[in-house]
Image: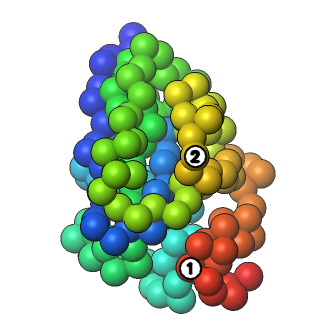
Amino acid sequence: MAEKVIGFAPFYNFDSRVLILGSFPSVQSRKVDFYYGNKQNRFWKMLFGFFGERVKDSTEEKKRFLTEKKIALWDIVQSCEIEGSADASIKKYEIAQIERVLSFSPIEKILLNGTKAYSVFCEKYKDSSFPYALMPSTSPANVRYDEKIWRKALADIFGMEKL
């Protein structure tokens, strides 16, 4: 039986340049009360690796890193009924009001982590004037994950050659 669950508040700052939107926090993320809490998820390894840094374990270190690198995180689904962590089980969802972040931070691009995040985003924001892109899900369930796509998108935003 699916239960109604509320997602996290957005993590952003006055100078965030990129907004990375996932679909909805996994069970492990909800346990640690922060984004991408499943140690098998490739997100933190990919992101820290892009900047040439070792992955930090604590939430506070991750928040410091995100702030320093000008990265905002949120999930496009603000609340939903969900069974476990599977995106396929997300039902009766409320879409996040991303204008809250976009009006506060100088976001240059929105990166959507996976097809569920992308499809839900497009329901409401497909005609957005903000540039956005579908990225391969960093979930361990995604067998077609390609880190090069993330590295290129981040290099385009941050003006770095990290391919």
Q: Secondary structure at mark 2?
A: loop
Instruction: Please name the colour scheme applied to the rendered image.
Output: rainbow
Q: Nearer the viewer, residue 152 or 147?
A: 152
Q: Quadrant of the N terminus?
A: top left
Does 138 sit left or right of 84 as displayed? Answer: right
Q: Is residue 92 left or right of residue 50?
A: left
Q: Hey, what amino acid is under mark 1? A: Phe
- Above or below residue 123? Residue 112 is below
Other residues around mark 2 within 10 Å, as few (<14) / some (14–19) / many (≥20) = few
Lower sequence index among marks 2 and 1: 2
Q: Is residue 162 above or below residue 75?
A: below
Alpha-carbon span between mark 2 and mark 1: 20 Å
Q: Which of these two is toward me, 27 or 24?
A: 24
Residue 4 versus residue 133 in the image, above or below: above
Whether residue 58 sits left or right of residue 50 in the image: it is left
Foreground pick, 81 / 40: 81
Q: Which residue is drawn at the image coordinates 28% and 67% (left, top)?
A: 14
Instruction: Identify the residue position indicated by label 2 in the image.
Output: 129
Image x and y of residue 3, in percent = 32, 17
Q: Residue at x 35, y 61 (%)?
A: 105
Quadrant for residue 58, please give it.
bottom left
Using the image, tell me which numbered label, if any, was put on residue 2. Answer: none
- Identify the residue at image location x=31%, y=36%: 7
Q: Amino acid at mark 2?
A: Ser
Residues at discs 2 and 1 in contact (Cβ within 8 Å): no
Q: Mark 1 Cα within 10 Å, few/some/many (few <14, many 20+)?
A: some
- Location of residue 66 by image quarter: bottom left
* Label 1 element class: helix
Residue 158, disc = 1
Give the residue at the far top of this rendering: 1
* Residue drawn where x is 42% and y is 28% of the image: 95
